[in-house]
Image (cartoon, rainbow, N blue to C red):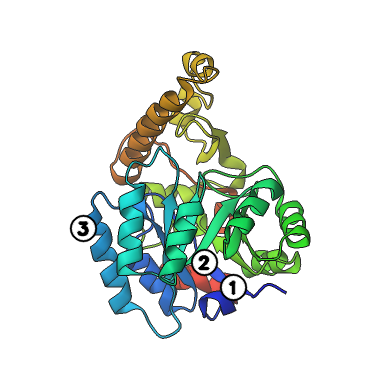
Amino acid sequence: MPKKLTEILQIKYPIIQAPMFLVSNTEMVIAAMNEGIAGCIPALNYRTLEELKQAIMELKSAKPKGGSFGFNLIVNKSNIKYKNQLDILCKEGCDFIITSLGSPEETIRRAHEVGIKVFCDVVDLKYAKKVEALGADALIAVNNEAGGHRGELSPKELITELVTNCKIAVISAGGVSSKADVDRMLSYGAAGVSVGSPFIASEEAGVTDEYKQACVDYGAEDIVVTERISGTPCTVINTPYVQKVGTRSTWIERVLNKNKILKKWIKMLRFSIGMAATKKAATEVTYKTVWVAGPSIKNTNAILPVKEIIKKLIS
């Protein structure tokens, strides 16, 4: 039987505070570790390699006994910083790496050489079997209730399929905002859960109060899927601005995406433009409100410390 997440990461509760672009920071992860869960930050949240190195040092010095922290790596060509980020993580050390949007082969090989575990985002059995064969330590099963880039299958469908056909641990991502949700995912066979959107409205999150308050004011029914951030379907809050600009790629992008030669460059351009817009909305007061979130904001009723949000998940 695959190990439980608590055994894999030596933590008290089977929960990872999910890595969220622009939102996650060391303050959030330290608060998470102090409450017995693991925390993770996208490496892309740091503009420079020196900032990434400083974050690792800060987390290592603040890590409590039984604490666990990791970083998320975008492992495809859209992330031109990937190779150098991996170098820093392997040199400075962390407990785990979560890979997204590409082949994790190099990350798994190099991380394992220095004792770092690697969990891989997957949305279906086909990719899950590939990363399992490459030596992944666990699968992050991204279901259709996840925030950001989500999968197509329901939590029950995806977890059941992966648990039945794979030999490594399955960590469910999406649809968790309470202890009842955690228990539901574990009942399907998950070894643990990855929770993101409820932590956006935390006091420690590195985004504007307007973004945090939006997660309080809007609910699951206000989440829509847009192609206008990264070129890949992504969930956002359906603000008046999102309604105005629409959620589909432009007709020019749709035409060019059919061209095998140009497709990669168009996607990189869309990713760059979308990330810039998302960053502006998350860190500045602007009418162009493109706020990424998932339906698990449904139980977000106030802006709270990370400690209080975790209490909802464990008791």
Could you tell me which secondary element the residue under label 3 belongs to? helix
Q: Residues within 10 Å of mark 3 (few under 14, many from 20)?
A: few
Q: Residue at x 45, y 20 (%)?
A: 262
Which of the 4 image quarters holds residue 3? bottom right
Count of marks overlaid on the render: 3
| Disc 1 residue type (three-letter) | Leu
Between discs 2 and 1, the one toward the N terminus: 1
Q: Residues within 10 Å of mark 2 (few under 14, many from 20)?
A: many
Mark nearest the camera among 2 and 3 is 3
What separation in Å lies between label 2 and label 3 (alpha carbons)? 25 Å
| Disc 3 residue type (three-letter) | Glu
| Disc 2 residue type (three-letter) | Ile
- Whether pointer 2 and pointer 3 mark residues with C-beta atoms closer than 8 Å, the reply is no
Q: Residue at x 38, y 83 (%)?
A: 64
Could you tell me which secondary element the residue under label 2 belongs to? strand
Q: Is residue 255 left or right of residue 51?
A: right
Residue linked to disc 1 = 5
Q: Is residue 152 left or right of residue 194?
A: right
Which of the 4 image quarters holds residue 34? bottom left
Residue 177 visible in the picture: no
* Residue 88 locus on image (x, y percent): 30, 60
Q: Is residue 155 left or right of residue 239?
A: right
Q: Is residue 152 above or below residue 195?
A: above
Q: Is residue 2 above or below residue 150?
A: below
Residue linked to disc 2 = 16
Q: Which mark is residue 50?
A: 3
What separation in Å lies between label 1 and label 3 (alpha carbons)? 30 Å
Could you tell me which secondary element the residue under label 1 belongs to? helix
- Whether pointer 2 and pointer 1 mark residues with C-beta atoms closer than 8 Å, the reply is yes
Residue 265 visible in the picture: yes
Q: Name the residue nearer the viewer: 306 or 49.
A: 49
